[in-house]
Image: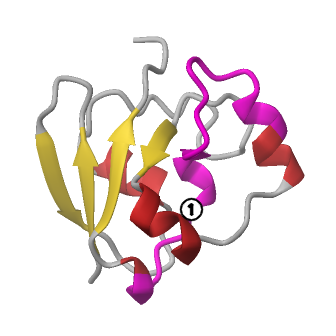
């Protein structure tokens, strides 16, 4: 199982194992990662699963679709490496993915 590394807002590092096919958001919610609210449950409709993907990992992700891009425009402190974790499907190639949780209204 791939491992996803979360840096929570307080700087705490959390490493969680995630089944292939799950999303990074599901991994965060299932493992109690603080700051990933996921209010819409993964429907790409709220931006409360916003995180910053470490630059080295961006080329390994699927390109952002228009819906995600539009939703990120509503997120607090959008950056060039911002992604919605509900839109990142875990694959074996993402083993070690590093994401920093953004300020998601909590």
- x, y percentage for residue 36? 41, 33
From the viewer's perspective, tell me whether residue 18 is left or right of residue 70.
left
Q: Residue 58 or 36: which is nearer the viewer?
A: 58
From the viewer's perspective, tell me whether residue 106 is left or right of residue 38.
left
Q: Residue at x 58, y 17 (%)?
A: 76
- x, y percentage for residue 91? 47, 82
Please identify the quadrant where the C terminus is shown.
top left
Mark 1 lies on residue: 88
Please identify the quadrant where the N terminus is shown.
bottom left
Q: Residue at x 56, y 20 (%)?
A: 77
Most extreme residue toward the top, as rendered? Answer: 106
Most extreme residue toward the right, as rendered? Answer: 66
Which stretch is magenta?
Answer: 70-93
From the viewer's perspective, tell me whether residue 3 is left or right of residue 84.
left
Does residue 74 belong to the magenta stretch? yes
Q: Quadrant of residue 8?
A: top left
Q: Quadrant of residue 102?
A: top left
Does residue 7 belong to the magenta stretch? no
Q: Residue 92 or 29: which is nearer the viewer?
A: 92
Q: Residue at x 64, y 23 (%)?
A: 75
Q: Residue 71 or 45: which is nearer the viewer?
A: 71
Looking at the rendered structure, the secondary structure element under dot 1 is loop
From the viewer's perspective, tell me whether residue 36 is left or right of residue 60.
left
In this rendering, the answer to whether 77 lies above or below 79 is above
Q: Residue at x 42, y 86 (%)?
A: 93
Colour scheme of the rendered structure: secondary structure
Most extreme residue toward the left, as rendered? Answer: 12
In this rendering, the answer to whether 74 lies above or below 22 is above
- x, y percentage for residue 52? 46, 42
- x, y percentage for residue 84? 59, 45
Within 10 angstroms of label 1, few (less than 14), some, or many (20 or more) residues?
some
């Amino acid at each position: 199982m791939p491992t996803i590394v979360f840096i929570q807002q307080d700087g705490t590092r959390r490493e969680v194992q995630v089944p292939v096919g799950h999303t990074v958001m599901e991994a965060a919610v299932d493992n109690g990662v603080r700051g990933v609210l996921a209010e819409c449950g993964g429907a790409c409709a709220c931006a409360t699963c916003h995180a910053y993907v470490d630059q080295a990992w961006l080329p390994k992700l699927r390109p952002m679709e228009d819906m995600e891009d539009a939703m990120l425009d509503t997120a607090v402190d959008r950056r060039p490496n911002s992604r919605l974790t509900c839109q990142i499907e875990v694959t074996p190639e993402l083993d070690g993915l590093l994401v920093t949780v953004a300020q998601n209204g909590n």
